[in-house]
Image: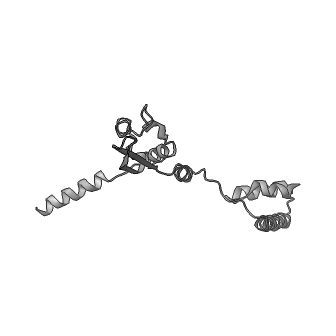
Amino acid sequence: MTKVDVQERIQQRIAGAKVETDEIIGTLASQMRTNPLDMIDSAGRFSLEQARERGLGHLIKGLTITRRTVPGEDGSKEIVETTKLEFHNSQAAAAQLSKIRGIEQQPAENEHTRRRRLEEYRRMLTRLKAEAEQQGETLTTQQAVEALKAYLPDFDAVLASQLVM
């Protein structure tokens, strides 16, 4: 093989390995919505053929088929087959999707932190109103809150509404 051949193979592998965002989301969504009944035949047994036909094989995390011989009632030997299926965790898939989609619930702010931020907002408002007064202007608390909203992107309007009351 020449260096050119090796480089071509490397480029082919890289191109084949690209995964699009939609593919990731689709895989997680199908894992989240896994329905084992889609792989069960009319006799109530797992059907590998049915799983293949429906394109559901990627949902199976593990498959164990155990065959053992047991004595029958008439002294003959019977083969008993046990199938164990394991699927990807649908709740884990839902959690990953919520992170990707930005809908993951954020932890609630504790009371101490909320009070500290409220106090900081009060100091900012007092300072802003004092600066306006030094320039000969009168600024209401509501006007000061609106000014802070315009300049602070993470300004908590709900918390600040407590300042106006």
Extreme-front residue of the structure:
74
> As drawn, which residue projects farthest toward the left?
1
Q: Is residue 98 left or right of residue 66?
A: right
Q: Can residue 4 be spotted in the picture? A: yes
Q: Where 41 sits versus 77, above or below?
A: above
Quadrant in which the N terminus appears = bottom left
Which residue is located at x 37 percent, y 47 percent? 71
Q: Nearer the viewer, residue 159 or 9?
A: 9
Task: Give whichever of 80, 113 is nearer the camera.
Answer: 80
Residue 154 is situated, as x and y percent measured from the top left of the image, at 68, 59
Query: Quick check: 144 above or below 112?
Result: above
Q: Is 127 rendered above or below residue 65?
A: below
Is 156 displayed left or right of 50 in the figure?
right
Q: Position of residue 49 (x, y in %)?
A: 34, 37
Relative to 119, say whether 102 is above or below.
above
Residue 147 at x, y percent in the picture: 76, 57
In which quarter of the view is residue 108 placed?
bottom right
